[in-house]
Image (spheres, helix red, strand yellow):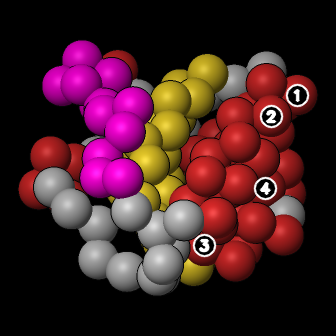
Amino acid sequence: MKIVAITACTAGIAHTYIVAEKLQKAAEELGHDIKVETQGSAGIENELTAEDIRNADVVLYTHDIAIRGADRFKGKKIVDVPISVALKQPKSLLSTIEKKLAAKQ
């Protein structure tokens, strides 16, 4: 599964970057490709390209504040969860998404 994700927490400091790392590790362990854009206090980092988005099977929003540039994802399958879900159970979150996508095919 190809995943693009955005992380954004209220303060834009710790959780934004911790969740990005946890999602990358979980995706790697589950054999998925992922690219994570962070929208933190330093601005947008690791920005998703149009090609990243086009090739993605799913878009994952993990956030507690509004996602900047959400219009880029029109027409894509979007999973939207609070950042705490991805922080506590990133592997379970990705497994659930994988199962739901497989059931829809």
Image coordinates of residue 42 in percent, x first then y, are: 36, 53
Give the distance between the C-alpha atoms of the residues marked 3 and 1, in whole angstroms: 20 Å
Query: Which kind of residue does numbered mark 1 sit on?
Result: Glu
Boundaries of the magenta span: 42-53
What is the crowding at mark 3: few (fewer than 14 residues within 10 Å), some, or many (at least 20)? many
Query: Does residue 47 appear to the left or right of 94 in the view shown?
Result: left
Of mark 4 and mark 3, the one earlier in the sequence is 3
| Residue bearing mark 3 | 83
Residue at the front extreme of this rendering = 42
Could you tell me which residue is drawn at 48 percent across and 78 percent down? 11
Comparing labels 3 and 1, the label whose residue is closer to the camera = 3
SS at mark 3? helix
Q: Is residue 56 magenta?
A: no
Of mark 3 and mark 2, the one earlier in the sequence is 2
Q: Image quadrant of residue 51?
A: top left
Of mark 2 and mark 4, the one earlier in the sequence is 2
Could you tell me which residue is drawn at 76 percent across and 66 percent down? 87
Q: Which mark is residue 90?
A: 4
Query: Which kind of residue does numbered mark 3 sit on?
Result: Ile
| Residue bearing mark 1 | 29
Image coordinates of residue 86 in percent, x first then y, are: 70, 64
Q: Is residue 50 magenta?
A: yes
Query: Which kind of residue does numbered mark 2 sit on?
Result: Lys
Give the distance between the C-alpha atoms of the residues marked 2 and 4, in whole angstroms: 9 Å
SS at mark 1? helix
- Answer above or below: position of 67 versus 102: below
Residue 31 shows up from this direction: yes
